[in-house]
Image (tube, helix red, strand yellow):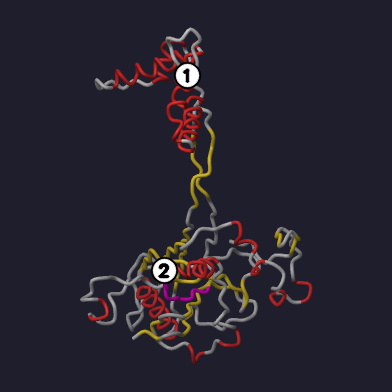
């Protein structure tokens, strides 16, 4: 039976003010209504919960065999390969002069639908007029229009001919695509962690077993406590999510990156960490490798770096002259000391 909260840790050692570690806090994935969207975004973007695993609060009495549920805390050693990767999506885009001109005319037509005839007439012009207008007023545009029509007509019979092909074969030119790299989309970050665990006694064996079971249970979807609650198990409930923090003692790490709330999307356990099957008398493997893949729920935005968690006000993290004098944060137009590299 899962405990509502509690603390599991590996290795089974005391945490001091100088101990660095990774804290994983289990949270319920609450989906809020439309009226609470702003609150949901804020909670997802600024997940800086207080540290339930404070230095003075951890004792052996908390470390009992258990499977954690919401608000449970798992403490793991710092991974061997710590890195973050921020990216946004860009893509090549092109628009030649004719497409741009046509788009502008169509936009004008949408804004003034009553002038459809006038707009079409001004674009096309009259080829039989003594004073041609529109595209027929310019020989180059006229030739482009005729070649474009010819290419489309040929393609009706299954050919694969483009306007640029006709231009290249006829005059050795193509339309200037005006290519440009444009912002396309945001991305979500993924974090991979690998922990090698070598239980040294019964206490650590119990902790490792409980950590693995807790992570497995909380990353799995739920069918509901009872069939009546879920109309005969018609739906699946979203798995729990996780808040990750690099810590130094009971404070946020003063340098390493922060995390937004994450889903545990992949978990692998290698029970033969030394590539050979070997266990203690009680069946505990002498070496295990735990691989975790977390994915953030929401993207990173520029506004996230203006949050108070990264600016002055975190003085309690440092003592005496230990506080670094960093000035690459700006809050309300004023440079401020910041804590950590941000997201």
User: Circle 1 sits in a helix, a strand or a loop, which is it?
Assistant: loop
In reply to whether residue 307 is colored magenta, the answer given is: no
x 65%, y 62%: residue:
306
Quadrant containing the N terminus in the rendered view: bottom left
Name the residue nearer the viewer: 105 or 11: 105
Q: Residue furthest top?
A: 130
Location of residue 46 in the rendering, given as x and y in whole percent from the top left corner: 56, 68
The residue beneath circle 2 is 290
Stretch in magenta? 23-33
Location of residue 84 in the rendering, given as x and y in whole percent from the top left corner: 54, 58
The residue beneath circle 1 is 174
Q: Residue furthest bottom?
A: 61
Q: Is residue 285 above or below residue 133?
A: below
x 54%, y 71%: residue:
47
Q: Is residue 165 above or below residue 25?
A: above
Quadrant containing the C terminus in the rendered view: bottom right
Q: CA distance from mark 1 to mark 2?
A: 56 Å
Name the residue nearer the viewer: 68 or 234: 234
Residue 201 sits in which quadrant? bottom left
x 42%, y 73%: residue:
30
Residue 42 sits in which quadrant? bottom right
x 39%, y 67%: residue:
273
User: Circle 2 sits in a helix, a strand or a loop, which is it?
Assistant: strand
Label pair 1/2, CB-CB below 8 angstroms: no
Q: Is residue 289 above or below residue 302?
A: below
Dot 1 or dot 2, earlier in sequence = 1
């Amino acid at each position: 039976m899962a405990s509502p909260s509690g603390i599991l840790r590996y290795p089974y050692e005391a945490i001091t003010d100088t101990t660095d570690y990774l804290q994983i806090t289990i949270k319920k994935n609450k989906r809020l209504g439309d009226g609470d969207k702003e609150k949901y975004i804020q909670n997802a973007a600024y997940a800086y919960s207080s540290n339930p695993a404070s230095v003075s609060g951890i004792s052996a009495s908390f470390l009992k065999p258990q499977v954690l549920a919401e608000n449970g805390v798992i403490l793991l050693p710092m991974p061997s390969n710590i890195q973050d990767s921020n990216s946004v999506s860009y893509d090549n885009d092109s628009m030649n002069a004719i497409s741009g001109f046509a788009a502008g005319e169509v936009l004008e037509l949408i804004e003034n639908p009553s002038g459809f005839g006038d707009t079409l007439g001004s674009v096309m012009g009259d080829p039989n007029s003594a004073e041609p207008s529109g595209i027929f007023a310019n020989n180059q545009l006229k030739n482009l229009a005729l070649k474009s029509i010819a290419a489309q007509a040929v393609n009706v019979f299954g050919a694969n001919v483009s306007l640029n092909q006709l231009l290249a074969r006829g005059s050795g030119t193509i339309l200037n695509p005006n290519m440009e790299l444009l912002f396309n989309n945001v991305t979500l970050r993924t974090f991979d962690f690998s922990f090698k665990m070598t239980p040294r006694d019964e206490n650590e064996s119990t902790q490792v077993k409980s950590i693995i079971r807790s992570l497995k249970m909380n990353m799995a979807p739920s069918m509901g406590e009872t069939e009546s609650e879920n109309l005969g198990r018609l739906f699946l409930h979203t798995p729990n999510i996780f808040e990750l923090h690099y810590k130094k003692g009971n404070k946020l790490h003063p340098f390493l990156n922060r995390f937004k709330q994450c889903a545990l999307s992949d978990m692998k356990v290698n029970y033969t960490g030394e590539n050979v099957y070997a266990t203690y008398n009680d069946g505990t493997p002498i070496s295990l490798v735990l691989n975790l893949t977390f994915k953030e729920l929401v993207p990173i935005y520029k506004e996230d770096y203006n949050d108070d968690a990264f600016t002055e006000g975190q003085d309690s993290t440092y003592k005496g002259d230990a506080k670094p004098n960093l000035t690459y944060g700006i809050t309300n137009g004023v440079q401020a000391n910041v804590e950590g590299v941000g997201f």
